[in-house]
Image (cartoon, helix red, strand yellow):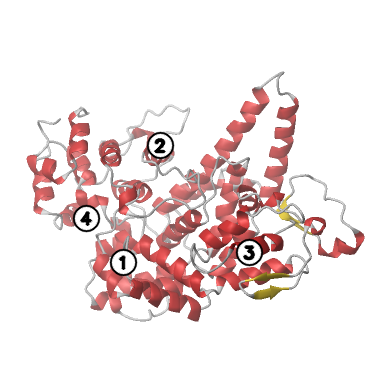
Amino acid sequence: MISKLPQTLRWTLPFSAVLVLASCSNPPRQTSQVITPAAPVSHVLEAAHVDPEKLLNRITWGANSTSSQQLQILGMDRYLDQQLRGQTTPLPAAIQAQIDSMTIAQRPLDKLMIDMETRRITAEQQKGVDDTLRKEYQQELTRLAREAATRSLLRAVYSPNQLQEQMTWFWMNHFNIHNAKHNVRAMLGDFEERAIRPNALGNFRDLLRATVFHPAMLRYLDNEHNAANRINENYARELMELHTMGVGSGYTQGDVQELARVLTGVGVNQNTDSPRVKAELQRLYVRQGIFEFNPNRHDFGDKIILGKNIRGRGLAEVDEIINALSRQPATAQFISRKLATYFVSDTPSDALVNHMAQRFLQSDGNIPAVLRSMFESPEFIASLGSKFKDPMHYVISSVRLAYDGTTIVNAAPMLNWINMLGEQPNGRQTPDGYSMTESAWASPGQMTVRFDVAKAIGNGNPGLFKIENQTSQERPPQPALANSAYVKNWAKNFSQGTQQALTQASSAQEWNAFFLAAPEMMRR
């Protein structure tokens, strides 16, 4: 294939990708209801003559013909307004059916986790005699985590509420939980569904509270082991350093220690029975599913955090400190900078971050208000088309464009591609989440794998349309790229070198691969 690779494309693309291509041999539209929202606040985007595809590539997981039609009907500012509202628009029926069939959609977290704990104990009792049950237990944990990742991908590809899907992933990464810790693999689906998704376009304080009270977070950062006279500071430290104020924002080690005292007794209970609580503390005991506040383990002394006195009285202390942390100017700065890094630039200006932080404080942490202040800024508009795609964006945007209007039945190939590119869902070992800067993802090795993915999608990956362990006699749908008027028109805006390379493709499959491998497709 190297002999067929256009010289212009060789110069346009990384050398490592050319080597990969050299080693390879050639081998009904979705519609969704458009709900007209209330009048938008302004006409900033239309007045700035923003390129529609560039806007879509930034506020959705990737532009395609379906989203382009929606934008044309509404106009750019109304489309943005609708996306910020996160209006409930149903998924295609076939996609929703796949999600509804999942275990994580059918079983409440408490029942699922109590059953898993029973299985773990039974397997432990057979340790050294029969390892079968332990292997089955671990396989089930992995299967449940895979269900959660699959559900996220299906929504990212097909949901009309694209900004909500991006923000759900953003917050999942911000409040990162590594999937290898204990049995949190079985909790990830509920963490996204109950803690993150409902608050992704809501209020930051509500979002923060939902994560603080979720068993997955409490287990991941060891707060279930945090008790009076046996303080564990892990969660308290990350709550201030990574989730709210940010490192170097003025809090002290003493503040972390005091916050850990506030969080004593907040934990997880996977047993069917509740613990014995002292009679005088029974009114303070709280259990919701497998979340538990055990006052027997709580430090009831008064605390001082960030100069604020917290009167010792139980779980109410946690809500008080959540309110305080979510309203800190440092939190407004930290969250605003992280959003701007994700949506605008690896190095957003202080002016933009300050503007967003001011809106954060004025709106008491209203996430859509902060996002709107960013989306309507000149810096955001000027940045369109230049932000480098992380692996998740690259794979999802490619599939959204290539298979627009086609229902995939197996997301396993997508998960495999994302894993190969180094961004496995909840695979980041440290609680800081994956980096959103170009330097983290633009290595020669990364680009080599991206060209493998481009070729796999461009050739028409049959695995996307084949249910695992079942044979399929039907020919899988082919990507809607080389024969798409929408895509061909979009390609006219690519560089002269890329356009020349596309004209030299010897087949539709090769054209598809060249298009998905183009430098323009690496950015959003």
Residue of label 2: 416
Q: Identify residue type, mark 3.
A: Gly
Q: Distance between the residues labelled 4 and 2?
A: 28 Å
Residue of label 4: 486
- Pointers 3 and 4 in contact (C-beta within 8 Å): no
Of badges 1 and 2, nearer the viewer stands 2
The percent position of residue 494, horizontal first and vertical second, equals 15, 55
Left or right placement of residue 15 versus residue 181 in this view: left
Q: Name the residue: 20% across, 27% down.
A: 23
In depth, the one of 411 and 167 nearer the eye is: 167
The percent position of residue 223, horizontal first and vertical second, equals 67, 52
Q: Name the residue: 56% across, 43% down.
A: 101
Residue of label 1: 71
Q: Which residue lies furthest to the right in this view?
A: 279
Q: Residues within 10 Å of mark 4 (few under 14, many from 20)?
A: some
Q: How crowded is mark 1: few (under 14 residues within 10 Å), some or many (20 or more)?
A: many
Q: Quadrant of the C terminus?
A: bottom left
Residue 109 vertical placement versus 241 (above, below): above
